[in-house]
Amino acid sequence: MTHDPGLASWLQLTLTPGLGAAALRGLLKQFGLPQEVLARRRSELRGFAPATVLEALDSQAVSEAVARAVEWVGASGHSIVTLADDDYPRALLEIPDPPAVLYAVGRVDLLRRASFAVVGSRNASAQGERNAETFAKVLSDAGMPIVSGLAIGIDAAAHRGGLAGAASTIAVLGTGVDVIYPRRNTELAKEIASRGLLVSEFPLGTGPLAHNFPRRNRLIRGLARGCLVVEAALASGSLITARSAADQGREVFAIPGSIHSPLSKGCHALIKSGAKLVESADDVLSELGGFHASGYASTTAAERPEASGDASLLAHMGHDPVDVDSLCARAGMSAEQVSSELLRLELDGRVAALPGGLYQRLEKG
């Protein structure tokens, strides 16, 4: 198999330890494409990187890393997209520090489409996950690939919704694209690789390092023309992602929730600072323009008609978490009757049990 010398040059620069993104951009600006950079005498490059880094540039370790990446990209469905490629997403060129290369598995064509980010808490409520999946499917059906970070909770639900819709989903990883984290999302990642896209800026084999995930988040917001926060605590990466998206001129949306839920605090803070409050995917689509819902019944995130047999107790529950004693008082039922009815509703997927003996009403998806 013949190797593309242009790709190998990009890899040699990006896989050299200590050669940071700023130094790399400086080299490209000064000398041109990577092949032209590498053709220069190393003494000419000293203004951009220390001598130890320049020595590593031509080391055996870097050469072997380049060879492994070139071998990896030869497999079916594997791609490495560089800044010079037509497939490189134009949206990322608008962020201050676009990655020089992207490792990808799956449908690289999705990078050329206008996409939408759906993010939120890892410790999501059952209703939050349902909302994320429902919104993501509608937005995907409207033509926008759903971008998220493959975390558990809201991210995973958003990816499932994107896959269920027409435009699929893009998972931006905080690890190497060949390292799936968390492991419990392995099957979901396989499905995304088959029908959507896994993408990462980090070299193959990179494990889950804490400082890489904020960098991952900047790509999520950079790729998407808008960002929806479904649930988020006040101190969360999702909130930072959304605020940074707003700073970059992206539309930011948030779903409101119970005033008693810590997972609503972040969304409420965003709304107070200018994010658009949304109750349905229609609210998002009407703001974006050029995208229209396709093939779904328009309902809000919080309201759907109840089956007549369920209406009484569910109506007494409202939409906030509630304990059994409060339900007994509201419904005029015994604790045994309420517990029996709650169990039936839980088995039917209408109610979720929460920590602390609380229960919360769910909406059927």
Image (spheres, helix red, strand yellow):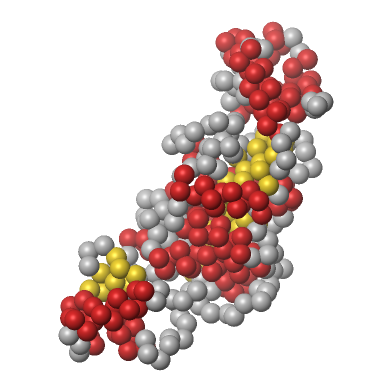
How many numbered circles are shown? 0
Q: Position of residue 245 (x, y in %)?
A: 55, 52
State the residue at coordinates (77%, 38%).
Answer: 85
State the residue at coordinates (46%, 86%).
Answer: 305
State the residue at coordinates (50%, 55%).
Answer: 155
Front-most of 161 and 12? 161
State the residue at coordinates (58%, 80%).
Answer: 298
Seen in the image, is 353 located left or right of residue 164? Answer: left
Seen in the image, is 334 located left or right of residue 354? Answer: left
Say if 141 sits above or below 156 in the image. Answer: below
Quadrant in which residue 341 is drawn: bottom left
- Determine if residue 286 is in view: yes
Q: Position of residue 156 (x, y in %)?
A: 50, 55
| Quadrant of the rendering where the N terminus is positioned | top right
Q: Position of residue 286 (x, y in %)?
A: 63, 72
- Determine if residue 220 is in view: no
Say if 361 sits above or below 73 in the image. Answer: below
